[in-house]
Image (tube, helix red, strand yellow):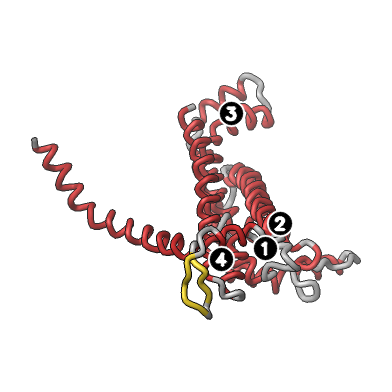
Amino acid sequence: MATAQTQTAARFMMAPSVIALLIWMIVPLSMTVWFSFQWYTAFRAPEFTGFANYTYFFANPNIWTVFLNTLILVGGVLAITLVGGTLLALLLDQPMFGQGIVRLLVIAPFFVMPTVSALVWKNMLMHPVNGLFAWIARTFGLQPVDWFAHVPLFSVIIIVAWQWLPFATLILLTALQSLDEEQREAAGMDGAGPISLFFYIILPHMSRALTVVMLIQTIFLLSVFAEIFVTTNGGPGVATTNLPFLIYLQAQFQYDFGLASAGGIVAVILANIVAIFLLRVVGKNLEA
């Protein structure tokens, strides 16, 4: 009886927070869904149009390029952060002088705001005239690369990956440090070399952490905006335009809030599909 009363009291105390969270989420989403069915611009009152906004959104001649850019951006950043994070985690797990300071420096980029990091990369590192990479190229007698003109999407991928690499490193390092040292010693006594030790002992142990990192990063990478806005503004053309930036263009420059709302709903559906798929992958990995 006391247990039931305690559970009821706990639910009663949690109810305001849950209700506030639902309102915080449902009201904006419901308004976006409603506006997605309206012909609603800055110059006229809303008028119901059914699925016309969705039809017009997918009729955009660049829509599939935008979807491809979004997938390439997410996939490229994941590849760099998972591989780089694993290597950095292995390096930081080794005893070294000033290990705490090194770990702090590796994690520091994650706390830099996306806008600030994009400005630093654009003006101090990737600038074709005054950037660090241009200076290094000229030092070796090479022609500097105009990163945002010749390889714009790759440049954005590098910037975003630099921000998310510390996150992956931190999670993977934590997983690596939980590995039983007796397993490593037993594998070494059985004659396993560093490569065999990595592929048969360390990597399977880190698989759960890798899937969790993949899930969390994918959800956030689907909404990358600031780095594109600061560096390339979606160009040249639509070379770096992803789904969130396309929605921004439709709302900011076309003043078509109904069309932008339809794009927002498409983005939400895409993010949920990816999240459900990754959650199943993570769930199977955790069960294993």
Q: Which mark is residue 259?
A: 4
Q: Residue at (64%, 60%) from the top-left corner? A: 242
Secondary structure of residue under mark 3: helix
Q: Earlier in the sequence, mark 3 or mark 1?
A: 3
Q: Earlier in the sequence, mark 3 or mark 4?
A: 3
| Residue 60 in sight from this viewpoint | yes
For discs 3 and 1, the disc positioned in front in the rendered view:
1
Secondary structure of residue under mark 2: helix
- Residue designated by label 2: 65
Circles 3 and 2: CB atoms closer than 8 Å: no
Disc 1 crowd, CA 10 A, few/some/many (<14, 14-19, 20+): many
| Residue 158 in sight from this viewpoint | no
Q: Which mark is residue 70?
A: none
Disc 3 crowd, CA 10 A, few/some/many (<14, 14-19, 20+): some
Secondary structure of residue under mark 1: loop
Q: Earlier in the sequence, mark 4 or mark 2?
A: 2
For discs 3 and 4, the disc positioned in front in the rendered view:
4
For discs 4 and 1, the disc positioned in front in the rendered view:
4
Disc 4 crowd, CA 10 A, few/some/many (<14, 14-19, 20+): many
Quadrant of the drawing holding the N terminus: top left
For discs 3 and 2, the disc positioned in front in the rendered view:
2
Picture coordinates of residue 228 (x, y %)?
64, 66
Look at label 1 and name its amino acid: Thr
Look at label 2 and name its amino acid: Thr
Q: Earlier in the sequence, mark 4 or mark 1?
A: 1
Look at label 3 and name its amino acid: Ile
Distance between the Cα atoms at labels 1 and 2? Answer: 8 Å
Q: Which mark is residue 201?
A: 3
Picture coordinates of residue 47 (x, y %)?
48, 70
Q: Which mark is residue 241?
A: 1
